[in-house]
Amino acid sequence: MARHRGHNFDSGDHVPVLFELRDVSLSRGGRQILESVEVEIPAGATAVVGPSGAGKSTLLRLLNRLADPDSGSISYCDRPLDSYAPLALRRRVALVPQLPALLEGTVGSNVAYAAQLAGKRSDPEHCLRLAGLDPRFAERDVAKLSVGERQRAMLGRALAQEPEVLLLDEPTSALDHEARDAIEATLADLRRELEISIVLVSHDPEQARRLGEWVVRMEDGRVAECGPLTEVLA
Amino acid sequence: MSTSIHVSAGQVAATLALVALAAAVSFWRKADLERDIGIAALRSFIQLTAIGYVIKLIFEADTLALVFALLAVMVVFGALTARSRAKKVPDAFWPLLIALAIAGTSTLGLVVALGVFEATARYLVPVGGMVIGNAMTASAVALNRLGDEMADSRERIEATLALGATAQEAAAPTVRRALRSGMITLVDSTKTTGLIFFPGTMVGMLLAGANPTDAVRLQLILLYTLLGSVSIAALVATTLAYRNFFTAAQQLREMDAEAPA
């Protein structure tokens, strides 16, 4: 992890930069999704906020190379992102997509599969507990889960890979307030218990206030503002 | 098996009454297929007449070079036809061409090597035509399904890629379903053959006055040969075609002008 560069938060802590995007642009189907994006994402909890269509999810997908930009450069821990093998990078920088999309089978088999891909020891019960699910869910068929349970199972599956960074795309957008609060509490616990950084995409500034330390505000494919929570969402 | 019958042009013309019946049904029930029925009848007449003369020439010349040339043309046209049914698969032509070529050569090579048929035009042309035709249908169905499944399973495939799975691993359930759908029609029809329907070769031989035992044996040979060729074609087509949905960096290609938020 980069130690020589970083940001000073309000607490006075020096926080290293994880991702650095320079002049990043991307278009799809003739539409400009990202335009000259310049942003640094430090270790810790970063919230990417902005209205629907601002390019938040696309930005997230670039960070673990589910997509590549048309132009510009992205680095992770001071190394160009494209110098990492994509599969190895994705096991270190795990993305939990907005729509829960588990493999057929049980929750446990999904978690075990993710652990096996990352070459980690499989402990579905532990991962599910971290994701706020009862360990007995390991035996449950994914087709019989509620949306909130699926979202947690996706989180547990990502945690099985013991990633350095969790990229979360609107993790609570399909949930009611109660389920949303539970997921947010889980994420806050994860930050405390594990040395893991989080990049969270959310359309809800209040959620960014609750979970983020650093905030990237996007508008029309550009970074409108970026900085500590207290400055951007004051 | 060598009995031959003479069919007059008048007899063929008489069956046009049934084509007229089909068109009448379509017109009566507003199925809007009259034009297609007319085109189908005309095209089948022209194409079969033309291929009849070509086959006659090839039988008379009896050289393997001409046989292979005819089969190669069938493979190319088969791949072009199948591609039109697999529109959602990017660059589907090459996987289909390779699938049909491998299915045709391996199946024909095997039946000749096993001594089932002689390597002469009289056997290779009709059997090759059946093999390539069935392989075309199977690979077209398989790739059609592959295209639909890849679109429907996009979120799941990308979520699996996001875990660091390879494109092959992420697409495996989708490819498996596509392969199965390409093979299942022939497997099912083979199961019911003789009970619910009589296959074409057997019918043709019986009409031509062949011994029923010979007709059944030849039909079984062809059914088993087709099972092999169809499985090879569907396997090769799906195995090659799924790759076209992914980039070298194991990313799912954008298929539509969709723009994630």
Image (cartoon, grey):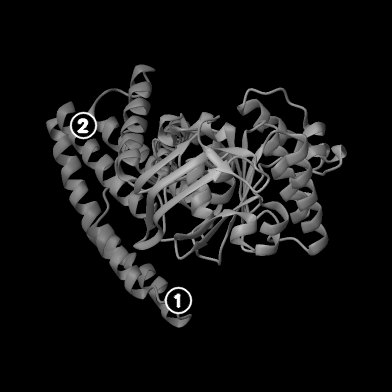
Residue B98 position by quadrant: top left
Instruction: Give how far across and how far down residue A34 sits, in percent.
Output: 42, 57
Split into 4 quadrants, where in the image is the N terminus of chain A?
top right
Instruction: Give how far across and how far down residue B126 sits, in percent.
Output: 30, 37
Residue named by callout 2? B68
Residue type, mark 2 in image: Phe
Residue B172 position by quadrant: top right
Instruction: Give how far across and how far down residue B96 sits, in percent.
Output: 34, 41
**What's the distance in space between the residues labelled 2 and 1, CA to CA?**
41 Å
**Neighbourhood count class around disc 1 (C-alpha, 10 Å): few under 14, some 14–19, many 20 upward:** few
The subunit letter for the residue under badge 2 reads B
Horizontally, is A147 left or right of A52 in the view?
right
The one nearer the camera, B225 or A188, is A188
Residue type, mark 1 in image: Ala
Name the disc covering residue B31, or none.
1
Residue drawn at x 65%, y 32% as measured from the top left: A114
Horizontally, is A16 left or right of B237 in the view?
right
Disc with the residue nearer the chain's start (2 vs 1): 1
Secondary structure beneath label 1: loop
